[in-house]
């Protein structure tokens, strides 16, 4: 039964992700990326990670992409020629090299000889028993307290930095 | 409940809620015009039907038959898509709002909510945060400077006030210990959260008005400076869809205020659904009253108020609530 939802969602995620780099109008690219976020959010729902699914939509689709659109509209970025028509051999080769590296990395990380062996304490039964949101909250303030606090400090620094840079002009 | 029955009940609930919502949206326009006329000592619509009661239907027919104009330089795809993007989030967020107690019907117990999701509140905020796309894309696709400015203003405004809105309900979360709207209503069986969270309620209400782009926060469509804002170029049904989205959003935030702070469907003597609707319309009346009373903010005032007053206030409210919850 899961396949009935997983396959369309995965296809949608891949298709919209491809459109992000293939479309020529930056606004359409941004909207395709929003589509990708939605497909991913659907996949999270399939994994019974409701909290992550909704937060994905709130933060990425609802806030970050709106700011992206904002910037694209204000800068009035023009249409770009499609990437396969660009005569830029070094960049093309660099891109292909990076893709090969990524595929290799993914193969190592998710290869069938590794993935089935991973069994953490947080099975979906356990998560459902405690509650999705409750469990994430508890872990953030106990096991992952230090990374959590460090992340918040980094974000704070970024905000202050942005303010300083904006003031200077 | 057996599966076929479950689907029938579900579809029935969706149909009823959707139908009532459409009807409310149509008649809210009538209600708003009537109430504002009262405030301004005039009669308002009187010609179509008794006391203008058929006015929304006449308006609907008129809008449907008007010429649909698409500017030549507009981005056609997005221009056509944008009103739909505004309308859909306005309607689907109602799916998690409980409008009555569990009832027994034909030997089945039926929850008076379309879907009780355990992250209901986050779902509402997630959907609400998408409403801005319809407005900002509509403004951009029209290829009109006024429309673009209106759309960008609206995006800035909605993002700013969404933040305070999200923070204003954290107090409610701490008291109810759940994100499910059904449980939040359940937690208010003794006292309504408006009594425990008066500041939270006030911030929520202000942000709700800003989120729905209503006066005194109706800068995105400030007629005097932006002609009409993001929907200048829209006509016919596409314009009507923006209009419907605005009123549907108004109903949704009013329902949310009712659910989070006014005890939802709870109340003595009368049936729960009646209580829910009464509170809902009380909040909507408040919105209309405010629109009739207050002049529009200036853009910089709006931004300063959102970031320098509402946001710190919401944060302080969280700290105080947390202290009380911890010491309890």
Image (tube, rainbow, N blue to C red):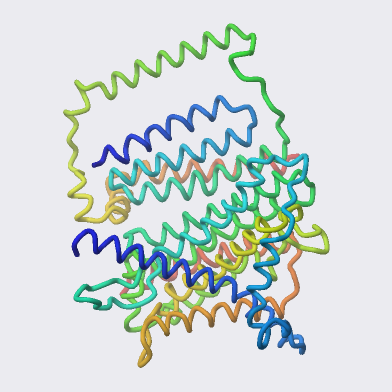
Kindly identify the residue that appears in the image at 53 percent across and 82 percent down: B282
Residue A65 pos. (x, y %): 56, 42
Extreme residue toward the right, this view = B224
Residue B308 in picture, x, y percent from top left: 63, 62
Q: A46 above or below B316?
A: above
- What residue is at 27 percent from the left and 37 percent from the top? A3
The residue at 80%/57% (across/down) is B226
| Of residues A75 and B33, the one drawn nearer to the viewer in this rendering | B33
Towards the viewer: A50 or B91: B91
**In this view, which residue lies farthest toward the top?**
A89
Quadrant where the N terminus of chain B lies? Answer: bottom left
Residue A110 location, quadrant: top left
Of the pair A86 and B162, the residue shown nearer to us: A86
> Is B165 located above or below residue B265 in the figure?
above
Image: A73 above or below B242: above
Q: How many labels does the image show?
A: 0
Give the quarter of the figure containing the C terminus of chain B. bottom left
Q: In this view, does A128 lie to the left or right of B9?
A: left
Is residue A131 rendered to the left or right of residue B39?
Answer: left
| Residue B137, position as x, y percentages in the image | 65, 46
Where residue A109 appears, x then y in whole percent?
A: 29, 23
Q: In which quarter of the image is residue B236?
A: bottom right
Quarter of the figure with residue B150: bottom right
As drawn, which residue projects farthest toward the bottom?
A: B269
**Direction from residue B41 to residue A70 in the image, left or right:** left
Is residue B82 left or right of B269 when viewed as pictured?
A: right
């Amino acid at each position: 039964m899961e396949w009935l939802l997983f396959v369309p969602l995965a296809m949608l995620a891949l298709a919209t992700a491809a459109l992000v780099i293939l479309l020529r109008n930056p606004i359409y690219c941004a909207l395709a990326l929003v589509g990708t976020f939605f497909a991913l959010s659907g996949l999270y729902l399939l994994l019974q990670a409701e909290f992550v699914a909704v937060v994905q939509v709130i933060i990425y689709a609802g806030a970050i992409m709106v700011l992206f659109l904002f910037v694209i509209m204000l800068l009035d970025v023009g249409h770009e020629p499609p990437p396969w028509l660009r005569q830029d051999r070094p960049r093309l080769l660099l891109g292909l090299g990076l893709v090969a590296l990524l595929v290799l990395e993914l193969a190592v990380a998710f290869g069938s000889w590794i993935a089935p062996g991973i069994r953490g304490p947080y099975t979906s039964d356990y998560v459902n028993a405690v509650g999705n949101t409750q469990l994430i909250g508890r872990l953030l303030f106990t096991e992952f307290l230090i990374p959590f606090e460090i992340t918040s400090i980094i974000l704070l620094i970024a905000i202050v930095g942005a303010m300083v840079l904006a003031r200077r002009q | 409940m057996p599966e076929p029955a479950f689907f029938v009940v579900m579809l029935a609930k969706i149909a009823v809620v959707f139908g009532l919502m459409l009807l409310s949206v149509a008649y809210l326009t009538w209600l708003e015009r009537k109430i504002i006329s009262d405030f301004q000592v005039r009669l308002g619509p009187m010609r179509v039907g008794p006391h203008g009661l058929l006015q929304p239907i006449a308006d609907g027919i008129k809008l449907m038959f008007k010429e649909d104009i698409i500017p030549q330089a507009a981005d056609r795809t997005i221009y056509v898509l944008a009103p739909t993007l505004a309308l859909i989030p306005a309607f689907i967020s109602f799916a998690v709002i409980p409008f009555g107690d569990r009832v027994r019907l034909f030997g089945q117990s039926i929850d008076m909510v379309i879907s009780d999701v355990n992250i209901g509140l986050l779902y509402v905020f997630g959907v609400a945060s998408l409403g801005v796309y319809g407005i900002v894309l509509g403004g951009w696709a029209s290829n009109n400077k006024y429309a673009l400015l209106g759309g960008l203003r609206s995006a800035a405004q909605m993002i700013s006030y969404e933040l305070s809105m999200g923070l204003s309900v954290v107090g409610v979360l701490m008291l109810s210990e759940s994100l499910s709207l059904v449980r939040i209503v359940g937690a208010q069986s003794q006292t309504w959260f408006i009594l425990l969270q008066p500041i939270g309620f006030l911030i929520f209400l202000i942000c709700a008005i800003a989120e729905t782009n209503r006066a005194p926060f109706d800068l995105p469509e400030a007629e005097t400076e932006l002609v009409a804002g993001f929907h200048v170029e829209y006509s016919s049904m596409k314009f009507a869809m923006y209009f419907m989205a605005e009123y549907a959003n108004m109903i949704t935030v009013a329902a949310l205020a009712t659910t989070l702070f006014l005890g939802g469907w709870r109340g003595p003597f009368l049936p729960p659904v009646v209580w829910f609707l009464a509170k809902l319309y009380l909040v909507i009346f408040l919105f209309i009253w405010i629109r009739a009373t207050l002049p529009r903010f200036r853009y910089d005032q709006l931004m300063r108020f959102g970031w320098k007053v509402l946001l710190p206030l919401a944060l302080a409210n969280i700290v105080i609530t947390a202290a009380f919850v911890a010491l309890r």
